[in-house]
Amino acid sequence: MDILVQQLINGLVLGSVYALVALGYTMVYGILELINFAHGEVTMFGAMVALAVISALLGAGVDLPGVVIALLGLLTAIPACMLLGYGIERLAYRPLRHAPRLAPLITAIGVSIVLQNIAMLIWGRQYISFPPILPQGYHTLLGARITDVQILILVASLVLMVALTLLVQRTQLGRAMRATAQSPQLAGLMGVDANRVISLTFIIGSGIAAVAGVLVSAYYGLAHYYMGFLLGLKAFSAAVLGGVGNLAGAMLGGLLLGVIESLGAGYIGDITGGFLGSNYQDVFAFFVLIIVLIVRPSGLLGKPSHDRA
Amino acid sequence: MFTPFRIAVLTALVSASLLTACGHSGTDSNVVKIGSASPLTGPQAHVGKDNENGARLAVDEINAVGLVLDGKAVKLDLIAEDDQADPKAATTVAQKLVDEGVVGVIGHLNSGATIPASKIYFDAGIPQISPSATAIAYTASGFNTAYRVMTNDAQQGTALAEYATRQLGAKQIAIIDDRTAYGQGLADEFERAAKADGATIVAREYTTDKSTDFMAILTSIKSHAPQVVFFAGMDPQAAPMLKQMKQLGVNAQFLSGDGAQTPKFIELAGVDAEGAIASNPGLALTKMPGGAAFKQKFNARFGEIQNYSPYAYDAVYVMVEAMKRAKSSNPAKYLAEMPKTDYQGVTGHIRFDKKGDLTGGAVTLYQVKAGQWQPLQTILSK
């Protein structure tokens, strides 16, 4: 029982991170029908910028509580990533807005590689450790352990998801976003500045990615210029699982993928008597993804129509 | 589309690439090209660059002293290529090096990359010395061009398993490997030796060389209550794995191989690193005959030593010594001199057996104490 609870906690924490990154994919897809493969790298930049600020503060001997230092790092990373997301859209995607759909897709992959290499040049090839400035304690829940950082990840993800849902459903900007998603031309005729809405979508998604990046590196205690790749891939799969273009779908897909991976890795070996081991955890996760896509090609919550974001 | 700005950028890019091309194509008959292949991008780029730096230090030293082969002054040129720690990329890189006319290769870093590449060097008749590939399969193919200056996994895995069962008294052991040729090979050797010593393998789990989340497999391992958790893989996985073990409350001794026995491991794992044990083939740098001098030279130029750079450094010297004996940098000629290697290097006394493996190699076990790797004991392999 305590093992199951522990695996569920593991999965939910992992899934919340996937969900946060998946939101960025799904928002951009909802509006532009573009898979922004550089989104994982934006997450990585968030972690890197925050770490640079944190180590600079610690290096200067600033006498503040660890949480405040981490918060200062985060508060620098968010605008930095917003700027980066805006820049990516402005420089790489907007000139290709009316190009054939493959062009921006290839560009996205290119941007991702460029960002990785820029990060490598700035921060080096080394793994950078995240100093233990956040509370390192843990609590016992039904025989399982949940650490302070894990609780932080769950709470932060929940808050961001609720805030984003409110933004999209309840504000004027959200209405503009939904309108642009349905038809950029028509929204334009109604007085919506499509370019502004698209820019803001990238900015918001990148801001959330920054938070995800900082949370991930605090959780695992490290950051690396390559960390965005696998995270981006998993988050993209989560977005597809939930129905790409659908915000609730990205959240559900992320959480589900995390839990499936966790239970898969934890139980495959025991269930099959060692015949299949935890090396099948990704196979297991993608097997579920394939089944879902066969039954529901547009994802769990995706709608086949133009009703997105 | 072609605004003046774009044209300017394009022109700059094109001319930059032409310039680099010119730099390489300088045809000097006295230049002898040696290849270095290791991951320079990706998660293992730090150890990969370290290998290149070790080789570069040796090459520059030899050039500074001046190398004379058969009465002619020769200049060495190190050509470093990025194999991304990937078997497929490794074969491309190997072919590229062969095509560029290198007379020998220092590399690759990973066993998984070294093994497929070794076939290409063998076909081209070019000697290859890996500073760090430890998988048995590398020298088992019978290629007369394949050498390594490091103890292999059979020796290391056995030493680790014997330490776990005899010194730590472990009866129940969990094993995790990263599914690379290195991790899998070392884990298999460890498992075999541990079973032979009467230990039970309660869990055999797997991860990848790009993962950072091990919570699921560690939770599963925790339910089997092992006394030792052995991980065969590299430091970027080992450090977060150990941290997550502590988070989950897995009360087992963490044991790992040379991939984790790095300063980076301690930096990444922080306070959780304390007490971790890992082995490294060969002697401790402080115990190496030329360790202190090497460290000083390396630090002055490249900063901290990551892991295998002393071996890459020695590998270059071993290769050049063979050239000196053969009085030629022609691979066909100096390859015949390779088996006669008897070189006192920074890392120890280097001699090869018939397969190209290091003879009489040592394995040293280290434990993290007060934030430093401290040598526990050195086991000489049979």
Image (spheres, coloured by chain):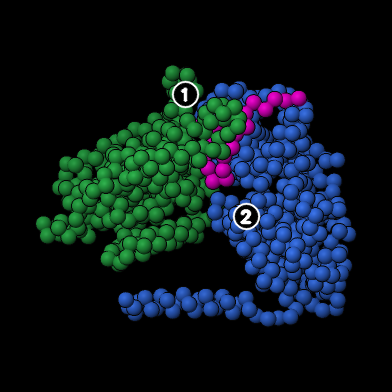
| Three-letter code for the amino acid on which mark 2 is drawn | Pro
Q: Residue B80 appears in which quarter of the rendering?
A: bottom right
Q: How many marks?
A: 2
Q: For chain B, what colour was chosen?
A: blue
Where is B28 relative to A35, above or below?
below
Q: How many C-alpha atoms fall within 10 Å of the one at disc 2: few (<14), some, or many (≥20)? A: many
Q: Position of residue B143 (x, y in %)?
A: 79, 58
Label disc, if present, on residue A308 of the rendered structure: none
Label 2 SS: helix
Q: Amino acid at mark 1?
A: Leu
Residue corresponding to mark 2: B87
| Disc 2: host chain | B
- Disc 1 is placed on an element classified as helix
Above or below B8: residue A66: above
Q: Position of residue B298 (x, y in %)?
A: 68, 57
Q: Which chain is green?
A: A
Residue B201 on the magenta span: yes
Q: Camera-side residue: B380 or B97?
A: B97
Q: Is residue A25 left or right of residue B166?
A: left
Q: Give the residue displayed 84% in from the left and 61% down from the top.
A: B338
Q: Residue at x 70, y 72 (%)?
A: B101
What is the C-alpha distance between the residues marked 1 and 2? Answer: 37 Å
